[in-house]
């Protein structure tokens, strides 16, 4: 019999019970539910709202339920309405009347809001740790490839020479911003809704500040209607992890391309790739493809939450029960993706020679050739035009700027001399790009230091 059965004259239809129940997906909040109830009972007795002896029984009973769930001695009843009802019913079964006093000055509406916030606080901490580990992996790899020249692209066309380290550090910076967003999301999740009651607070002399301290929240939600009906923090976290997934997905997309025979810039470790059931030659980058695919799923979770909330009148509505599957799926997915991505990345072989070979083709030093003429006193536009003509000539002759004979250079400008070959060599092109944020080894070293130093803040 449900706890609210008093008002009803019939038993609930079994299908409605199943339809209504959230226990299949909210049972994972059992620990938060129990800890929240312990803090609530502690405060109730301190305020003289319930007897100390009752609160002691409640706390004792709750602790036992917690340990019984954790050791597998107690299974959550799959026909219960939700985890909150289950824990309370189990408590009353064990300790009798005292258990019935726990729900004084509380509603499931502020209780569920509390549980989700507590659950997500822990998740944010876990995701933060994983992102930090990923950043360390990326910067570690970058440190090994400061001199690994590769083509930098725009429009997926070879554009200018960079290094693999420089490319990797772009991702490290994206991930650093993800950490910042996680920290910010935590700030707004870390507020206590308990004490809001069903929507209109309570007439009991509760002490919300005390519960806030007991549960380690930074402050209490300031309005009881808002306290029970706000799910911004879920939406914000879903949005933060969607952006994080977008970064992982772009990185994955590049790795997929780099694994192809057309690029062959990297080779995945056998433990992190899969074969084909029919084509014996295949080695597929499934992990990265799945990350790309799962990004869509996390975006879907964000959309579910946004759409679910957009026209709900204040305060609580049952629609909001749908928040949990969406946000849990989003955090589960992002954790799974990062923890698989890290070892895949750290075991990947980087084919530096192929990267350099690709950089040597495609005239990616043309800008440097024009700059060479500018340094000899020509206006940039003239230098640009001459270099364009040189590239055209190279294509006609089937050579590169590095192998184009000096007489061809001289035909277009007297300013060219033998030094041009050094000026447009790939190493010069990269090493001279010393501007802050650029690809020269010293610039990238500074970028690595910046990221590592900033990691301490999260
Ligand atoms: N299982 C519910 C949820 O997740 C708990 C809150 C129920 N409140 C209510 N008024 N029916 O949202």
Image: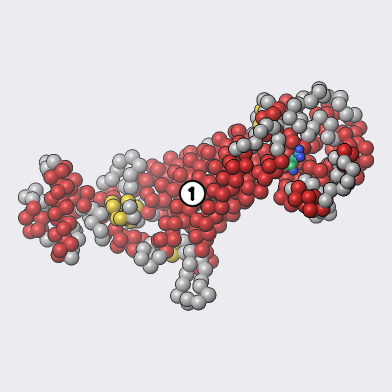
Q: From where the camera sits, is residue 210 visible?
A: no
Question: Relative to 337, is 452 on the left or the right?
Answer: left
Which of the image's four quarters has the C terminus?
top right
288 or 176: nearer the viewer: 288
Question: Relative to 268, is 105 on the left or the right?
Answer: right
Taking the spot 78% from the left edge, 50% from the top edge, the residue there is 16
Which x, y percent locates residue 259? 42, 64
Q: Is mark 1 within 8 Å of ligand 1?
A: no
Q: From where the camera sits, is residue 361 visible?
A: yes
Above or below residue 362? Residue 22 is above
Taking the spot 33% from the left edge, 44% from the top edge, the residue there is 438
Which x, y percent locates residue 225? 69, 29
Taking the spot 36% from the left edge, 63% from the top edge, the residue there is 263
Which x, y percent locates residue 271? 53, 66
Q: Secondary structure at mark 1?
A: helix
83 or 439: nearer the viewer: 83
Q: Quadrant of ligand 1?
A: top right
Above or below residue 237? Residue 420 is below
Which x, y percent locates residue 241? 55, 45
Q: Dot 1 surroundings within 10 Å: few (below 14), some, or many (20 or more)? A: some
Taking the spot 83% from the left edge, 35% from the top edge, the residue there is 103
Question: Relative to 234, is 204 on the left or the right?
Answer: right
Residue 421 in which image quadrant = bottom left
Above or below residue 212? Residue 361 is below
97 or 209: nearer the viewer: 97
Q: Residue furthest right?
A: 96
Residue that mark 1 sits on: 246
Question: Relative to 239, is 18 on the left or the right?
Answer: right
Residue 8 in which image quadrant = top right
């Amino acid at each position: 019999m449900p706890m609210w059965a008093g008002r009803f004259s019939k038993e609930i239809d079994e299908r409605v019970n199943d339809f209504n129940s959230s226990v299949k997906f909210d049972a994972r909040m059992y620990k938060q539910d129990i800890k929240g109830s312990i803090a609530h009972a502690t405060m109730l007795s301190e305020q003289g709202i319930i007897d100390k002896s009752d609160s002691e029984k409640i706390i004792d009973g709750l602790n036992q339920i917690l340990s019984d769930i954790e050791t597998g001695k107690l299974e959550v009843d799959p026909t219960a309405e939700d985890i909150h009802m289950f824990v309370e019913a189990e408590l009353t079964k064990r300790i009798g009347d005292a258990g019935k006093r726990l729900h004084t000055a509380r509603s499931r509406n502020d209780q569920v809001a509390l549980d989700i916030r507590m659950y997500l606080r822990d998740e944010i901490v876990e995701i933060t740790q994983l992102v930090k580990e990923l950043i360390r992996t990326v910067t570690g790899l970058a440190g090994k490839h400061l001199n690994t020249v590769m083509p930098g692209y725009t429009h997926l066309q070879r554009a200018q020479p960079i290094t693999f380290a420089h490319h990797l550090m772009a991702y490290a910076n994206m991930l650093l911003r993800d950490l910042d967003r996680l920290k910010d999301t935590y700030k707004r999740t870390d507020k206590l809704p308990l004490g809001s009651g069903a929507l209109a607070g309570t007439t009991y002399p509760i002490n919300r500040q005390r519960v806030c301290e007991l549960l380690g929240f930074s402050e209490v939600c300031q309005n009881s209607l808002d306290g029970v009906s706000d799910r911004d923090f879920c939406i914000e976290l879903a949005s933060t992890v969607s952006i994080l997934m977008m970064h992982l997905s772009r990185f994955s997309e590049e790795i997929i391309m780099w694994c192809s025979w057309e690029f062959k810039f990297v080779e995945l470790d056998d433990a992190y790739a899969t074969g084909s059931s029919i084509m014996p030659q295949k080695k597929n980058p499934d992990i990265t493809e799945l990350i790309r695919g799962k990004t869509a799923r996390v975006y879907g979770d964000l959309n579910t939450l946004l759409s679910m909330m957009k026209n709900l009148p204040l305060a609580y509505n049952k629609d909001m029960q749908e928040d949990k599957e969406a946000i849990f799926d989003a955090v589960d997915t992002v954790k799974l993706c990062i923890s698989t991505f890290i070892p895949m990345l750290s075991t990947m072989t980087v084919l530096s020679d192929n990267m350099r070979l690709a950089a040597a083709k495609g005239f990616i030093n043309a800008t440097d050739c024009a700059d060479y003429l500018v340094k000899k006193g020509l206006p940039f536009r003239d230098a640009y035009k001459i270099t364009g003509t040189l590239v055209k000539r190279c294509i006609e002759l089937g050579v590169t700027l590095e192998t184009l004979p000096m007489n061809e250079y001289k035909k277009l400008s007297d300013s060219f001399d033998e030094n041009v070959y050094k000026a447009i060599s790939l190493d010069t092109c990269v090493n001279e790009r010393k501007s802050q944020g650029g690809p020269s080894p010293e610039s990238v070293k500074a970028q690595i230091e910046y990221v590592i130093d900033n990691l301490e803040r999260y």
